[in-house]
Each structure stands twice: as C-alpha cells, then as structure tokens.
Image (cartoon, grey):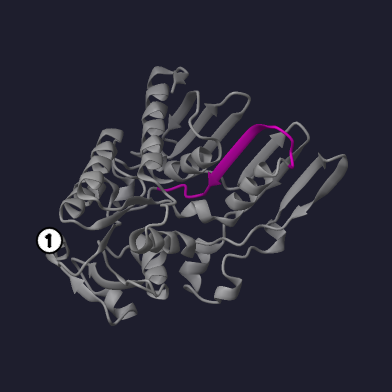
C-alpha cells in the first residue's frame, strides 16, 4: 500500500460511531487520527489510539490530516466542508450534501479549484437489496421496466426529544434525511428524470419537520415512486418493480446498520448477508422460461465506499459517488419542495 490516509471525523454521534469509525479502523488504507468531540471522549474509549480534538479549527490546522469527514448536523455541512476544502483537505460530507443546491454547487467549484476530492457518503448504494434490484434491472429479468417503487418505512409516532433532527432547521426533515438515499439510488439507476411531483407532509401531532414524503419521478416509459414516513407500523415492500415480463417484490431493510449497532463490524466473511426470510420474490418470463422463486439478496458492502475513496485519493481511480450526482439529488429535493408548494408537476 503506497499511502496511508490520515483522517479526522468532525463528530462522534450515531454516524461517526457506527457508519465511519468502524470502517476507517478496519481499512488499512486509513488512520483515524482525530475526532472532534466537544463534550466527552467516547471515541477514545472505543479506539484508544485516537486523539480527541475539542475544536474544529484544530483539525483544519493539522497539516498531517489528509481527509476530513463532515458528519455534523445537516445545517453545518456547507460551512464545515467549505472550510475543510479551503484548508486543502479531501472531504467526505454526510448526506445531505448541503442545505441547498447552490451551496452544493459552490463546494464543487471550491474542490475543483483546490484540486481536492469531494464526495458524499451515499453508503446505501451498497445496500444488498438495492444492488440486487439493480442487477435484476440490468439483466432485464422483468423485460422493460415500467414501474419502480422504493419505500423506507419506520414507526416512531412521537417527537424524539432533545435532537436537532426534530427542529425546523435548514436541511432537517425526512426529505433531507432519507430522501437523499432514495433519490440517489433512483438517479444511479435511471439518471435525470423528466418531471417531478411531490407530496410533503407533517403527520405526527406536534411535529415541526416534514416527516412524510412521496416523490413521483417520470422518465420516458418509467414511473419512479419514492416514499418514507414515521407512521408505517406495518411496512410496505422496500422495493416493488414491475416490467413488461414480470415483477419483483422485496421486503425488509438492509441488515448492515442493525449489525453495526448490535455487534459492530464483525464476522466479515458473512458481512452484509441477509436472512433468507427477507429475500425478494420474482415472478417473470425470461427468454421464454417462466421463473417464480425467491432471489437471494446480494451481500451488502459498506466497506466498498471506503475502498473506493482510498483508491481515488491514493491511486487516482474513478470516484464512485461523484459530487455532481449529489448536486442533482439536491436539485431534485428542491424541485420536490417547489412541486409540493405549487401542487403541480415540475419539469426537471
């Protein structure tokens, strides 16, 4: 390995503890040198070799740091990513990319001027269920796809106390939390939509944020529906695909997040594998053969994000999650807000 990338995390909440630190610790291409924690030293308890910084400026001024991961509350993403880029650091930003498309566009320009890698942590491109759906589409197992529906359903019928995620701040609400994942997956599969229609709501009593969204994106011969809310006690399928030759339906969420919270990054030989009870069902006709069976879910692979990031920074390989793609996601979010406000279909 020609280079080790010295890395700093700007926070150690859920994202830092479960989605970043375990993979940086396990990947020999990275050294997690510093974590910004204003209160406490939880990161050091889990990773004793880490140095805890009490101030973001300390990380910016540390010339040994190559990469900064901005995993702070959403409304701080733009400000901190901009400062990191201007300090000549490579930057990973947690989703959402920024609070607006204009902020995201400015960050892309700064990264280009500074000749630094800028990307967004779209780890759910490596969800096993999404990779399985993508392969079914690529292999045309359903014929020509005409409908793609993606749900990310949860049940929390109360307002979680003492969290910025329930406050009306720039970039909060499900549209900016789960929306970037579902939109990014759709853009990966189908590219730029022709039109967008959205219904955005606050369903829980006393809620301040958008906690339910439905976005409908139309392509040439394809309808894409993206939905998420907090009041789905009986979840609908994660993916529903209909084509000219058949259908695919998949329940259950990718197991990697739960595994990270329950056991950490362990048992790598079986990492990301899903229990058979959650495998999707396909019913189709392919090359004249009738197929009706469960399809094994591909193993999820969040470590692949960090392997690609290492290859891009250290070896010049192609970046998987391009900032321009994340910018398109931000523009789709803003079009969804415009559609909801005007109660009409928006040409994209």
Q: Residue at x 48, y 68 (%)?
A: 260
Q: Residue furthest right?
A: 289
Which quadrant: the C terminus? top left
Q: Which residue is mark 1?
A: 57
Q: Residue at x 29, y 42 (%)?
A: 98
Of 299 and 277, nearer the camera is 299
The quarter of the picture where residue 298 lies is: bottom right
Q: Residue at x 33, y 43 (%)?
A: 172
* Image location (x, y in percent) of residue 304: 48, 62
| Residue 253 in magenta stretch | no
Tally the marks: 1
Q: Residue at x 56, y 77 (%)?
A: 267
* Image location (x, y in percent) of residue 39: 20, 68
Please give left or right for residue 161 compared with residue 195 in the image.
left
Q: How many residues crowd around disc 1 within 10 Å: few (fewer than 14), some, or many (20 or more)?
A: few
- Residue 150 can be seen in this image: yes
Of 211 and 25, nearer the camera is 25
Of 120 and 249, nearer the camera is 120
Which quadrant: the N terminus? bottom left
Q: Residue furthest bottom?
A: 48
Give above or below for 292 relative to 10: above
- Residue 229 can be seen in this image: no
Q: Secondary structure at mark 1?
A: helix
* Image location (x, y in percent) of residue 185: 51, 43
Give above or below for 8 relative to 208: below
* Image location (x, y in percent) of residue 119: 35, 50
Please give left or right for residue 27 compared with residue 245 in the image.
left
- Magenta residue span: 141-158
Please give left or right for residue 306 compared with residue 215 in the image.
left
Of 306 and 315, nearer the camera is 315
């Amino acid at each position: 390995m020609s280079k080790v990338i010295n890395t700093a995390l700007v926070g150690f909440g859920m994202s830092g503890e479960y989605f970043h630190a375990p993979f940086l610790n396990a990947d020999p291409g990275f050294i997690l040198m510093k974590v910004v924690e204003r209160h406490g030293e939880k990161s050091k308890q889990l990773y004793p070799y880490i140095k805890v910084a009490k101030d973001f400026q300390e990380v910016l001024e540390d010339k040994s740091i190559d990469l900064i991961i901005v995993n702070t509350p959403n409304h701080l993403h733009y400000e901190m990513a901009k400062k990191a880029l201007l300090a000549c650091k490579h930057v990973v930003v947690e989703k959402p990319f920024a609070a607006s498309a204009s902020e995201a566009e400015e960050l892309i320009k700064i990264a280009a001027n500074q000749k630094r890698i800028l990307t967004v942590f779209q780890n759910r491109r490596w969800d096993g269920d999404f990779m399985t759906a993508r392969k079914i589409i690529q292999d045309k197992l359903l014929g020509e796809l005409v409908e793609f529906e993606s749900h990310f359903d949860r049940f929390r019928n109360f307002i979680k106390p003492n969290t910025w995620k329930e406050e009306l701040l720039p970039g909060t609400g499900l549209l900016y939390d789960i929306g970037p994942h579902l939109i990014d997956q759709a853009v990966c599969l189908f590219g730029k939509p022709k039109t967008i229609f959205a219904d955005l709501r606050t369903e829980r009593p006393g809620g301040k944020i958008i906690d339910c969204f439905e976005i409908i994106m139309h392509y040439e011969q394809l309808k894409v529906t993206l939905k998420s809310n907090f009041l789905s006690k009986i979840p609908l399928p994660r993916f529903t695909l209909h084509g000219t030759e058949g259908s695919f339906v998949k329940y259950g969420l990718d197991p990697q997040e739960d595994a990270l919270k329950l056991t950490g990054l362990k048992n790598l030989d079986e990492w990301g594998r899903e229990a058979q009870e959650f495998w999707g069902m396909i019913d189709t006709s392919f090359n004249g053969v009738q197929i009706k069976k469960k399809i094994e879910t591909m193993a999820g692979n969040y470590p692949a994000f960090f392997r690609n990031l290492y290859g891009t920074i250290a070896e010049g390989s192609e970046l998987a999650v391009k900032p321009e793609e994340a910018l398109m996601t931000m523009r789709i979010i803003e079009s969804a807000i415009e559609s909801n406000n005007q109660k009409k279909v928006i040409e994209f």
